[in-house]
Amino acid sequence: MIIKVPEVITLMELLQREFTGASRNTLKKRITQKRVSVNGQQITNPTHQVLPGDTVEYTKPGKSGSRYSPPFHIIYEDGFLFIVEKPAGILTVGDRGTPGTSVYKQMLDYVKDTSRGKNSVFVVHRLDREVSGLLMLAKSEQVQQQIKANWKNTRKKYYALVHGHPPGDAGTLRSWLKESKNRMVVSVKAPEGAKLAITHYRVLKNLGETTFLEIELETGRKNQIRVQLADAGCPVVGDFRYGAQNRFHRRIRLHAYYLKTEHPVTHQVMEFHSSLPADFLVLKEKDEHYR
């Protein structure tokens, strides 16, 4: 179904107008399940603002070989774990302060539906709401704990688009990070109450005002990449929380594209890759009226 946008409106509000018989929760689920695209780009954030002249395409849920279609693209699955592609705009796990759906909730529903309530899923690690890419989920608590115990040996790489240019073609960022009372993560000089964060970067392409980077984590602290790049004077594009320019439509340009880990049961080394999202390097400036 193709919808032409008549005015400035959120994606959720637009779909509510078109599908008056559908509940808000149903429409939100359809958006986060990658059933909706704007101008050819899949959007998973229900509050995404569409503009007059935009084209919104809605795809009805289809059937798969099993009873239900998976809510996310499954890169890998065996009897012990999933590797899924998390879209930007959805939480890995929700909490009391962040109502709404999450990757965990939707995968849990999917697994329970397809196993008639016999199986479950367990979160191994998290990606920030606005970060896309590879996410691992375990099928049992025992496997979850085995993966977590070996997580420090897992290699994790990201693509990042940043404002400005970091020093050199490659480098390492080291700092002590601490979460403040307002849940902001900040760098501090004294290590007391803080955690050491180490991030390696490599320049893939200089794009003028921005730089396309490959990031590899040595540690896995909350908001680590975002804070350290901002401290280096190169905030991630779209990351308004940590100092990015407000000229462009919000979409944090950070994508977890590579995982290399040891299987928790077979102990085989596994590698997974995720392609760069469409339009990741394309910046769409806001109209002056909406800044």
Image (cartoon, helix red, strand yellow):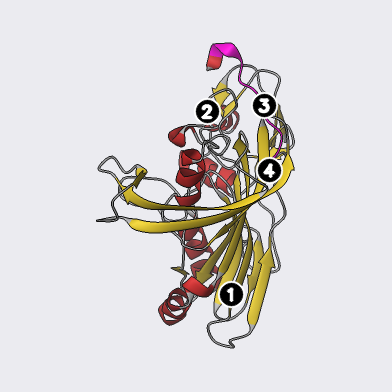
Q: Amino acid at mark 4?
A: Phe
* Viewer-nearest of discs 4 and 2: 4
- Find numbered disc 4 in the image and state the secondary structure of the residue it sits on: strand
**N-term-proximal mark, 1 vs 2:** 2
Please give the name of the residue rendered at 50% of the width and 49% of the height, measured from the top-left corner: 225
Q: CA distance from mark 3 to mark 1?
A: 36 Å
Residue labelled with disc 3: 284
Residue 247, percent across and down? 58, 22
Q: Amino acid at mark 2?
A: Glu
Disc number for residue 212:
4
Please tell me whether residue 22 is drawn above or below residue 154 in the rendered image: above
What amino acid is labelled 1 in the image? Thr
Q: Earlier in the sequence, mark 4 or mark 3?
A: 4
- Quarter of the image that includes the N terminus: top right
Looking at the image, is mark 4 or mark 3 nearer the viewer? 4
Q: Residue at x 45, y 51 (%)?
A: 224
Q: Is residue 281 magenta?
A: yes
Side (left or right) of 218 relative to 255: left
Q: CA distance from mark 2 to mark 3?
A: 22 Å
